[in-house]
């Protein structure tokens, strides 16, 4: 996966949320964006996924130059997992996955079910196939959301703090699922406050503070941070 950001800026109500963001990241599989609350992490993820547009600057995701990309076509190439799951509670787990395959990607019912069942089995969710999504635990719901995003074989999977609403046990369920993606070299960008997880699952780290990228590099920067900001952040989350 390649990400290129050149002079990217974003404001809300005249407040700078992202300020002169620049990055050239080449051939990385798992990228974790970390930093304190209000750093601009989720805003950056929304720009990368075209949920929002920058006020200025250029963003390239692989071969997609987002300024010229057609949103509807780009969305078919990517997956997005939100902080809170977005399943339809009245539909079965199986239908939550097959619906997008049939209606958006125009696959047959048979092919959609084959894809969904294979993934649900792979991620140890097959026993929940016929349950209504509203009957699932938070961790199960988030894992199904990840499976649904994977069902379209995305170029990149974007995850915005997928464990933020979960207790520690359910958090581990979801993180194990994401680590499985890492083992299979699935391209993903994750915003996370789970720094130990980022250290295990990512191969590249972006550390943000006050709307800026303060430090970035291979995951080894978590063991040998160069900036005082990252040193202080890591000491506060008890990673060292």
Image (cartoon, rainbow, N blue to C red):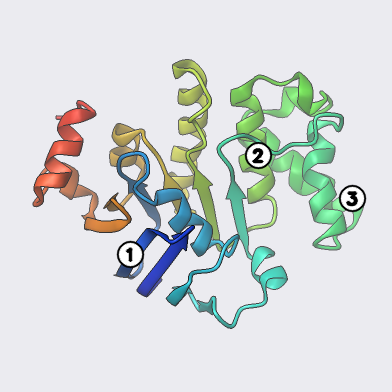
- Quick one: label 1 or label 3, which is nearer the N terminus? 1
Residue 145 is marked as 2
Q: Which residue is mark 3?
A: 110
Quadrant assignment for the N terminus: bottom left
Does the residue at mark 2 contact the one at mark 1 (Cβ under 8 Å)? no
Residue 94 falls left or right of residue 143: right
The picture places residue 234, in percent across and down from the top left corner, at 19, 35
Q: Measuring 33% from the left and 64% from the top, which residue is drawn there?
A: 19
Q: Secondary structure at mark 2?
A: helix
Q: Is residue 132 above or below residue 27?
A: above
Q: Residues within 10 Å of mark 3 (few under 14, many from 20)?
A: few
The picture places residue 65, in percent across and down from the top left corner, at 51, 79
- Quick one: label 2 or label 1, which is nearer the N terminus? 1
Residue 201 visible from this viewpoint: yes
Residue 1 visible from this viewpoint: no
Residue 19 is marked as 1
Q: Is residue 20 above or below residue 169?
A: below
User: For residue 240, what is the image quadrant?
Assistant: top left
The picture places residue 128, in percent across and down from the top left corner, at 75, 24
Q: Measuring 55% from the left and 61% from the top, which residue is drawn there?
A: 49
Q: Residues within 10 Å of mark 1 (few under 14, many from 20)?
A: some
């Amino acid at each position: 996966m390649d990400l290129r950001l050149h002079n990217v800026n974003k404001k809300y109500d005249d407040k700078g949320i992202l300020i002169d963001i620049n990055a050239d990241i080449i051939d990385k599989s798992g990228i974790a964006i970390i930093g304190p609350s209000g750093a601009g992490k989720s805003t950056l993820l929304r720009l990368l996924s075209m949920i929002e547009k920058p006020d200025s600057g250029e963003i390239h995701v692989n071969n997609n130059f987002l300024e010229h990309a057609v949103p509807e076509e780009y969305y078919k190439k990517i997956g997005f997992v939100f902080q809170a799951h977005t399943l339809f509670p009245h539909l079965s787990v199986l239908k939550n996955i097959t619906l997008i395959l049939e209606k958006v990607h125009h696959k047959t019912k048979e092919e959609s079910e084959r894809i969904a069942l294979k993934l649900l089995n792979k991620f140890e969710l097959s026993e929940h196939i016929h349950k209504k999504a509203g009957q699932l635990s938070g961790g199960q719901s988030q894992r199904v959301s990840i499976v649904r995003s994977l069902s379209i074989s995305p170029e990149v999977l974007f995850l915005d703090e997928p464990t933020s609403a979960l207790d520690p046990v359910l958090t581990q369920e979801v993180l194990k699922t994401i680590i499985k993606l890492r083992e299979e070299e699935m391209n993903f960008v994750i915003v996370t406050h789970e720094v130990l997880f980022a250290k295990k699952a990512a191969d590249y780290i972006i550390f943000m503070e006050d709307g800026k990228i303060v430090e970035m590099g291979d995951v080894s920067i978590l063991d040998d941070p160069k900036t005082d900001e990252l040193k202080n952040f890591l000491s506060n989350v008890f990673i060292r």
